[in-house]
Image (cartoon, rainbow, N blue to C red):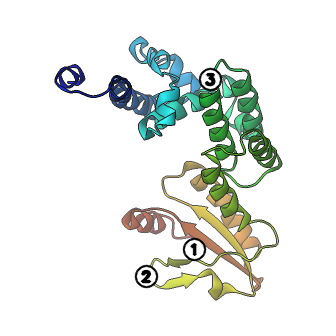
Amino acid sequence: FHQNYMSKSSLPQNTGKLLEASTRMAPLSFKKNYIMAYFNTPEEKEKMPELLKKVYGEIPFSDELLKAKHNEYASVLTYHFYDLADPFFKGKTPEEKRVIYLQFPNYADQKIKKGNYSATVKEFLLAKNVYEAFRDGISEIATSLYNDFVNSYPSSIYLASIDRKYQKWLTLSKGTPAPDFVGLTPEGKKVSLSNLKGKIVYVDIWATWCAPCREELPKAKEIQKQFSTNEKITFLYVSIDDKMDKWKSFLKSDPDFK
């Protein structure tokens, strides 16, 4: 289709090359999505068909596509960033992975800086690493990487996105007032965090599709039981399910979960 289109168009050569590179991103993005869905761990990737393994060599490092702010290319290049985690976590048990998880941003930072990337691609990957380092909040490692990136790339186009995420976490930092929010009870009643002002509120964000969240529920119930006679403490479990029927069905299956 692309060749047929180009044979009949009068696009400038540089635009044609950019369009060709863009056209190649669509099938590559589909392949990477498939790999992420079915071969997400280092162990699963070892069993991956040879045809899919070739995808890793297909990811181009294109300054042109990055400078053109091509969304699908940024998505594909992000997959390359995630692939850096494979050797870091390979062979580790789930418990070991949880222990070393927070060290990954430092590892990725060094791998990217030593990698054979162009300056443009390296800036993107380092920015992605800082952005992901703030995924679970503000930490010493994330802040250090952020400061390093700001000093190295003070005019980076990626700083706005990183700063937005950083500022969001600052609103939840120790000592700041908690932002208010409103949710619905299973009965449809509205409840806001401000309704509980004056109490110590234990907030647990969870979802029916989140396996680690469900794994920790028995422990959460133990804590709730331990403080059941203390009227100063309230336990607030906030589901981020987008399907209310699944949420209500889960609650019915576990009547002890209040």
Label 3 sits on residue:
118
Asked if residue 70 lies left or right of residue 154, the reply is: left
Q: Secondary structure at mark 1?
A: loop
Q: Which mark is residue 188?
A: 2
Task: Indicate which disc, 3 or 2, sits on the residue closer to the N terminus.
Answer: 3
Residue 62 x/y as whole percent: 50, 25
Which one is in front in this view, the residue at disc 1 or the one at disc 3?
Answer: 3
Q: Secondary structure at mark 3?
A: loop
Question: Is disc 3 surrounded by few (<14), some (14 to 19) or many (20+) residues within 10 Å?
Answer: few
Badge 1 amino acid: Lys
Query: Could you tell me which quadrant the N terminus lies in?
Result: top left
Q: CA distance from mark 1 to mark 3?
A: 53 Å
Image-quadrant location for residue 89: top right
Badge 3 amino acid: Ser
Asked if residue 132 lies left or right of residue 176, the reply is: left
How many numbered discs sit on the rendered protein?
Answer: 3
Task: Indicate which disc, 1 or 3, sits on the residue closer to the N terminus.
Answer: 3
Using the image as rendered, state which of residue 219 and residue 177 is in the foreground: 177
Farthest residue in the top direction?
50
Residue at 63% x, 58% y is 164
Which one is in front in this view, the residue at disc 3 or the one at disc 2?
Answer: 3
Q: CA distance from mark 3 to mark 2?
A: 54 Å
Residue at 44% x, 38% y is 70
Which one is in front in this view, the residue at disc 2 or the one at disc 1?
Answer: 2
Q: Which mark is residue 175?
A: none
Label 2 with label 1: CB-CB less than 8 Å: no
Residue 258 x/y as whole percent: 57, 74
